Image (tube, rainbow, N blue to C red):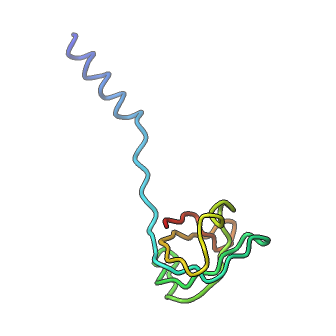
Amino acid sequence: MNKFAGLMAAAILSISIPAVAVAADLTKGTVKKIDLKSKKVTIIHEELKNLDMPAMTMVFRVADEAMLESVQEGQEIEFAADRVNGNLTVIEINE
């Protein structure tokens, strides 16, 4: 009976542990312009596969305005973008 209780406990724990989050697809880009007032950043970027968008230069909103303080114009970055409330938004930046 003890083995059965141990197996049940292991099964319950394995079900209750949340799945590991899948990392967002990162895209290489260069910060062209930072607009702190409007909380936007212009990025010259490679193809955004998750948005089915070719390489281009475009303006994005940022999910967190602190992201704008961590980058500088001309800086090369890796970032993830997605549609948030219908707006193209940078959701992650790696310097």
Classify residue 57 by image quadrant: bottom right
Left or right position of 63 against 53: right
Provide residue 32's location: percent of width, then percent of height. 61, 83
Identify whether 19 is placed above or below 24.
Answer: above
Q: Residue at x 54, y 89 (%)?
A: 56
List the single residue furthest toward the right.
Answer: 37
Query: How many numbered circles does the render carry?
Result: 0
List the single residue furthest toward the top.
Answer: 1
Provide residue 6's location: percent of width, then percent of height. 26, 18
Q: Residue at x 44, y 68 (%)?
A: 25
**In the rendered view of the protein, which quadrant contains the N terminus?**
top left
Identify whether 5 is placed above or below 62.
Answer: above
Classify residue 63 by image quadrant: bottom right
Left or right position of 31 against 3: right
Residue nearest the observer in this picture, 73 or 86: 73
Q: Residue at x 42, y 33 (%)?
A: 16
Identify whether 79 is placed above or below 18.
Answer: below
Provide residue 3's location: percent of width, then percent of height. 20, 15
Residue nearest the observer in this picture, 83 or 58: 58
